[in-house]
Amino acid sequence: MQIKEILQLSPESQNVVVKGWVRTKRGQANIVFINLNDGSTIKNIQAVVEDGGIDEETLKKITTGACIAVSGILVASAGSGQAVEVVAKSIEVYGTADETFPMQPKKHSLEFLREKAHLRFRTNVFGAIFRVRHALAFAVHKYYNDNGFFYLHTPIVTASDAEGAGEMFRVSTFEPNSAPKNEDGTVDFSQDFFGRETSLTVSGQLEGELGAMALSKIYTFGPTFRAENSNTTRHLAEFWMIEPEVAFYELEDNMNLAESFVKYVIQYAVDNCKDDLEFLQNRLLEEEKSKPQNERSEQTLLEKLSFVVENSFERLTYTEAIEILLKSKPAQKKQFQYEVGWGIDLQSEHERYLVEKHFKKPVILTNYPKDIKAFYMKQDEDGKTVRAMDVLFPGIGEIIGGSQREDNYEKLMTRIGEVGIDPENLWWYLDTRRFGSAPHSGFGLGFERLVLFVTGMSNIRDVIPFPRTPKNAEF
Ligand code: ATP
Ligand code: MN
């Protein structure tokens, strides 16, 4: 049985075996307390070794980090802090850990733990984060399954660049120094593994659209890769993205889906990760104590999560947002680093002003200028904007980016020409607009940004087991 299950039993002096990693061992003259954790819950189980119950030799091997199996009887605990404990009758030591084990029972900085990513799972904070991450991933699948969506596996190796941004990782089997060349000296990719230039995908959307044009409602949930050199607390080079794509949905339906989906998965975590979220909330409260009063957050983590679930997201157009920003105090006082004006790509400082200062709730911005958005977004009648929607969250900024897609073949071809994409490379995508085209919409949610929000962590490197960022792929 896992510790989570054992902690729920009523103690009747029954025999139990608990297996786990030693968090602490406290010894007194004739009694020793061992705290064990097996990752099934944030809670430890206490094993009690009564005088002479276990031989000295074995006891000596039991130190922080060791892995042991305790056989004993389950009794009501005499101490406070736990309802039950195990009185040890025998202990098997699976693996010892000497004093160089880095996860000693004291406070470690998150930076330190990042350098020990192979062992940081064994701390309370990372145990909590990865259990919450799991619950959110499960809730994603549950939400879409319950709502008639099909999980579509789009390729990880691709020959297309969905965003036309050129920030992709190349996939090749060529030796770097001896790649075959064309006469003009460029690399001859026709001789490469796939017979063409290929990369790791930045998005499953284009293939997702192909699925939606037959299955109606699909979603993807897979790894995506971006070779952008953004060393921020919100960017990874490898991250997981959830991308629903739905036939017959217009922008309004797309917004409704995004809002209902995000609220559902947050509520799922609140309902299923109570102990972990309370732990993370207390961690934040501790952290806040070292901040000046005016920088402390007004809401606890759980209050913030409930607030998002219970209130409707503010919806407005990009143009309306620009007007608000132009009239804002920081714009008047020239406190924004980047100047505000119609046509700019909103910076994080602008998004955060709207969400955290002006509306004080999640915001959905729509109808962005077409020049700052991808070629596939449906053009508005005004010829200037497209049916884009970004969902902005407090503390995070953009958590979702999506749009209604251009379903008109001619308009799409014109736009592709304007942005300089070779239609030859996208013939298969364009075919959906030639054969039974339909209005459709979708979006991408960055999974780690969601996990950041729900756990209240502040660096995206702490919510994925092994972060990939510029100059960092150690584990
Ligand atoms: P940003 O402006 O924050 O870089 P983006 O506009 O490049 O985001 P999209 O291409 O719309 O983002 O991707 C959809 C979603 O994927 C984003 O809303 C965000 O949640 C997430 N995302 C994008 N880039 C990253 C990244 N490098 N690391 C983690 N998540 C990301
Ligand atoms: Mn980006």
Image (cartoon, helix red, strand yellow):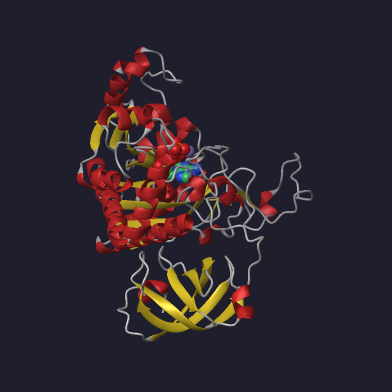
Furthest-front residue in this view: 29
The front one of 215 and 293 is 293
Split into 4 quadrants, where in the image is the C terminus? bottom right
Point out the quarter of the image occupied by ligand 1: top left
Residue 415 point in image, percent of width and height = 41, 33
The front one of 271 and 389 is 271
Residue 413 point in image, percent of width and height = 41, 37
The front one of 296 and 473 is 296
Query: Residue placed at 38% from the left, 54% from the top?
Result: 279
Furthest-top residue in this view: 333
Above-or-below relation of 317 to 451 = above
Residue 156 in view of the camera: yes
Residue 245 point in image, percent of width and height = 33, 51
Query: Residue placed at 31% from the left, 49% from the top?
Result: 437
Could you say which quadrant of the image residue 395 lies in?
top left
Above-or-below relation of 329 to 141 = above
Residue 377 point in image, percent of width and height = 36, 38
Query: Residue placed at 42% from the left, 31% from the top?
Result: 348
